[in-house]
Image: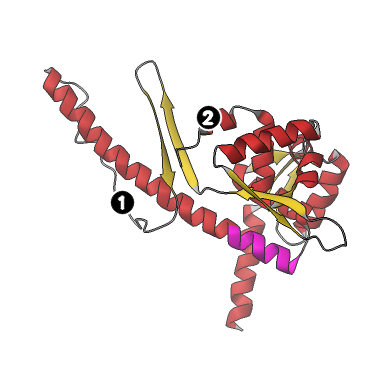
Amino acid sequence: MAEPDIFYILGNRVRRDLLSHLTCTECYFSFLSSKVSVSSTAVAKHLKIMEREGILRSYEREGPFIGPARKYYDIAIAKTYVATVTPNLFWYRGLDLGGEVIKRTEIDISRIPDEHSSLLEMIHSFHELSVELEKVLQALKAVETRRDALMKEIKERYLKEIGDMTQLAILHYILLVGEATVDELSDRLNLKEREVLVKARELDRFVPLIIKDGAIKIDEERLKQKLGGESDAGED
């Protein structure tokens, strides 16, 4: 299959929102439709586009209740994309995640001069910088492969131990962006702001959060304290 046109896919807000929900869990059509502010016909169109591009796959599965099978969607690729756009550079590349990845690398551009006396020296330096860039890309692939695997484990563990999908969706989004406003989460999850705050406070019982001035993020100090307490309990 040809490389998916990821920039075309990500250029639409609705498609970005659908992908965001699908990174949290597999979803059936009516659930996805309820999470975005467009018609079900428009949702079906966007899902079809992403399936055609190879971003999504769909399948039918029996639900827990009597009735017709539901059509589910999930993400069919595992890639990270890098792009540069300047007056002098335009390039992009997709990196397949998984497989054998590096554990350690070193980047050194100090040996590459800032000034050059000839065209050939410039070309040589550009080539050397490209070699260093390839190391960066392989390091990025390694980090994203690890993050992808760990996020999967976090989702499975949270659903097994806590079981609240809305709390998980908030945690998932905060882990990805670092800090989110209540308004942003309300829009992203199609919830009222009051509902976001209620779920965030419930989540705070399990994962320490800072909920202040309309923003939510991981409370790193309390997280370290909790981890320290778990270590002490393990030693006892």
Q: Residue at x 25, y 39 (%)?
A: 131
Q: Tell me the kind of residue under disc 1.
A: Thr
Asked if the magenta segment contains residue 157, the reply would be yes
Q: Position of residue 179 (x, y in %)?
A: 65, 41
Q: Quadrant of residue 111?
A: top left
Magenta region's main secondary structure? helix
Element at badge 1?
Answer: loop
- Residue under circle 2? 7
> Does 39 sit above or below residue 177?
above
Q: Residue at x 45, y 51 (%)?
A: 97
Q: Residue furthest top?
A: 87
On residue 105, which mark appears?
Answer: 1
Q: Is residue 30 visible?
A: yes
How many callouts does the rendering have? 2
In this rendering, the label closer to the viewer, 1 or 2: 2
- Tell me where the magenta segment starts and ends, as one range: 152-162
